[in-house]
Image (cartoon, rainbow, N blue to C red):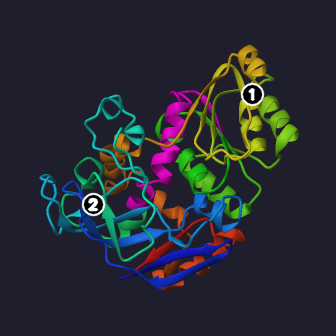
Amino acid sequence: MRGAVIHAPRDVRFETLDDPKILHPTDAIIRTAVTCVCGSDLWPYRGAEPVGDPHPMGHEYVGFVEEVGSEVTGLRPGQFVVGSFATSDNTCPNCSNGFQSNCVHREFMSTCQAEYVRIPNAQGTLVATDGTPGEEFWPGLLAVSDVLGTGWWAADAAEVKPGSTAVVVGDGAVGLCAVIAAKEMGAERIIAMSRHASRQKLALEFGATDIVTQRGDEGIAVIRELTGGIGADSVLECVGTAQSTQQALHSARPGGSVGFVGVPHEVAVDGQELFFSHVGLRGGPAPVRRYLPDLIERVLSGRIDPGKVFDLTLPLEQVAEGYRAMDERRAIKALLKP
């Protein structure tokens, strides 16, 4: 098969790779229907994370089951499935508590920008749809496997409630999907922080009521002005930088909550400051598997369309252009078709 391999910062190549094989009886092999480039893939691409030896890339996927291991009884070849970037057995205590992304048998997916993918812990990780969805639904279901599930977790962790005010920090695919989540959870006011016209337009389409273009202290001041000097009930941090984290913490009201889902880079939180703020802080890798059945239904029913975050579609062989377009902000998120 063929797939994406990163060799060095800004050096992603489409290469011939070994076909994946069943290594454990809990594995499955899927044929990729569509995959994509994630904003978090840009950290190593930009050199903000070490690349090390050349290795495959990608952790978002939907596809067709090709083969299952002997202990996978709930799936069969030919089924269309949606999974998560973090695999889970869906039976351990952490999974039972709703934190499948902290499963004791967790593995992070990392080879999905390819024609075929091995899925560990397949029975607990993959959710099959009823029949094969129309291709028009594939982008939305692909979003469910990570960016929508992560945006949903941001809203859940930030305790968005009906009638509340929510602030979304970050206008990438996760931030835009977090707007969807806040809307679906009943937020009355959703303030999206964005400097990019195309992303502002999509945020408003997804349910944002206000746009704030300022960042840092200026952005915090605007948020406080919009919330009567107090701050927001819920803040959804979807970037992972030091600035975005501080912006999120200082935009929440006393007693409010921050859900942080951007992978942290050089982020430090002052314990004294947090202590006296009365702001709740929760985050981490999204437990996407917890939300999969619900989110799949919302997409297939047409209630939501997170697939709109894919504003560039390319053949998988042009994966390097997908990285370039996202790095240069010419695209929010690049969809790749094998």
Image location (x, y in percent) of residue 195: 77, 56
Looking at the rendered structure, the kind of residue marked 2 is: Val
Residue 62, by quadrant, is bottom left
Q: What residue is rendered at 23% in x and 58% in y?
A: 24
Q: Which residues are magenta?
A: 140-167
Against 305, is 250 above or below? Answer: above
Is 185 displayed left or right of 239 in the figure?
left
Q: Residues within 10 Å of mark 1 (few under 14, many from 20)?
A: some
**SS for dot 2:** strand
Q: What residue is rendered at 75% in x and 27% in y?
A: 227
- In the image as oriented, which residue stretches furthest toward the right? 218
Image location (x, y in percent) of residue 258: 63, 30
Please tell me whether residue 105 belongs to the stretch shown in magenta: no
Residue 44, by quadrant, is bottom right
Q: Earlier in the sequence, mark 1 or mark 2?
A: 2
Where does label 1 land, which residue? 227
Image location (x, y in percent) of residue 130: 19, 58
Against 128, is 8 above or below? Answer: below
Against 273, is 113 above or below? Answer: below
Looking at the rendered structure, the kind of residue marked 1 is: Thr
Q: What residue is rendered at 55% in x and 27% in y?
A: 163
As drawn, the label of residue 277 is none
Image location (x, y in percent) of residue 279: 67, 21
Quarter occupied by the N terminus = bottom left
Alpha carbons under labels 1 and 2: distance apart: 42 Å
Where does label 2 land, which residue? 81
Is 248 displayed left or right of 306 in the figure?
right
Please tell me whether residue 149 belongs to the stretch shown in magenta: yes
Q: What residue is rendered at 69% in x and 69% in y?
A: 327
**SS for dot 1:** loop
Question: Relative to the observer, which residue lies in front, 151 or 221?
Answer: 151
Q: How many marks overall?
A: 2
